[in-house]
Amino acid sequence: MTDHRRFPPTGPATPPARQGKRPSLIERAGGNDSWRGMVAPQPSPPSAPAPAAPDQAVALVPTEPFGAPTFDPANLPASTLRKDLPVAASLEGKVTPQEFRGTFHIIDRNHLRDQGMIEPEGSVTGLLEEFRIIKRQLLRTAARARVSDHGVRADRIMVCSALPGEGKTFCSVNLALSMAAEKDTEVLLVDADFAKPSVLSTLGLPAGPGLLDALADPRLAVEDCIMGTDIPGLFVLPAGNASGNDTEMLASARTVQVLDRLTANTRGRIVIFDSSPVLAASPASSLAMHVGQAVVVVRADMTSEAALRDAIGLLSGCEDIKLLLNAAHFSPSGRRFGTYYGYKE
Ligand SMILES: Nc1ncnc2c1ncn2[C@@H]1O[C@H](COP(=O)(O)OP(=O)(O)O)[C@@H](O)[C@H]1O
Ligand SMILES: [Mg+2]
């Protein structure tokens, strides 16, 4: 993921790893065999043509560092393409579609743009193109996991990072907007950074009861907390009120039931969790046990290798961990999405 800030940080605001003393994980990774293939290669040579703007210099996509087998969607059985089927047929005729009972909201497109998010009805941009590539990999893995008996976890993706400020919310919201644009997929974006929830403010949505409230109170149906939006296919579940024992609640048996209800009777719904930083708050490692994929956002100029290794160790509850390089400024291959469609900033 490219850095899409209009004015990338300079001087004192630049994170320490960028200030020259010690190269960042990404900058050192080219020579590190154990991380090869999951991080950015070397910076562009000086002779490379200068990008039009520093914040759109490169696209970099998540990788599958742990040797996931290659996957050909053409080999999938037709039953996995269940979004093409009526709900009743896709779920063996036993269910009716989940009834939407929450509140409905219009999302202010200007606010979305100001927050640096994809504009649902906007033109093709580099940002849009980068997230198209990322979502495709995640959706393919989810489809593959569905047939590999991963059950409901296949449809759950957790976005996390080692530390705060590495781009979890930026990536979760953009990923959700991008997936919602799919014809056969709807997305439920869950604000799961309980200590610092920011999905609602990023989308310009009002406060409301959420996941933690439904976990704490068995009388509250989690479906009632889900917000509908005027962006087709996009639903949002707020974090709810933090209580101090969020981690224990997430590890409880009730969590299994509540999370199951998020996708029960839905048609092709993917649940994206904007999680807490793994090394700063413990709920992330509890949540990892309930998801099919964990996307670890690695900020190009910020995340250290030690922090990343530590974070991945704490996510061991999830079998499929992917890394997403965020805010990169260079592309050794010259990859630069969006320009082909005449995109200019
Ligand atoms: N690739 C990017 N391009 C532009 N801005 C970004 C990018 N990634 C993150 N940001 C910005 O960096 C700040 C921190 O990101 P955020 O997603 O809130 O981090 P986290 O959720 O991990 O704490 C936000 O202002 C966000 O908009
Ligand atoms: Mg956040």
Image (cartoon, rainbow, N blue to C red):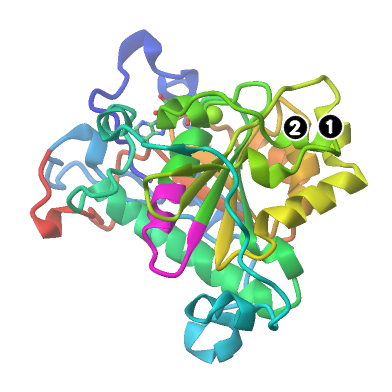
> On the image, numbered disc 2 is attached to which residue?
212
**Quadrant occupied by the C terminus:** top left
Q: Which residues are magenta?
A: 175-186
Q: Is residue 179 magenta?
A: yes
Instruction: Please say if 161 is above or below 86.
Output: above
Residue 252, located in which quarter of the rendered image? top right
Residue 215 or 15: which is nearer the viewer?
215
Disc 1 vs disc 2: Cβ atoms closer than 8 Å? yes
Q: Residue at x 86, y 39 (%)?
A: 218
Q: Visible in this render: residue 176?
A: yes
Q: Residue at x 73, y 55 (%)?
A: 261
Q: Residue 334, image x and y in percent?
A: 23, 55
User: Is residue 31 shown left or right of residue 132?
Assistant: right
What is the number of the mark on residue 26?
none
Q: Residue 21, image x and y in percent?
A: 46, 20
Instruction: Please say if 66 is above or below 161.
Output: below
Residue 311, located in which quarter of the rendered image? top right
Q: Residue 115, image x and y in percent?
A: 34, 28
Q: Is residue 81 magenta?
A: no
Find the distance from the CA under tag 1 to the CA under tag 2. 6 Å
What amino acid type is highlighted by mark number 1? Answer: Ala
Within 10 Å of the Cα at label 2, are there few (<14), some (14-19), or many (20+) other Cα atoms? many
Q: Ligand 1 lies in which image quarter? A: top left
Residue that sits furthest to the right in the current view: 253
Q: Residue 154, image x and y in percent?
A: 67, 65
> On the image, numbered disc 1 is attached to which residue?
216
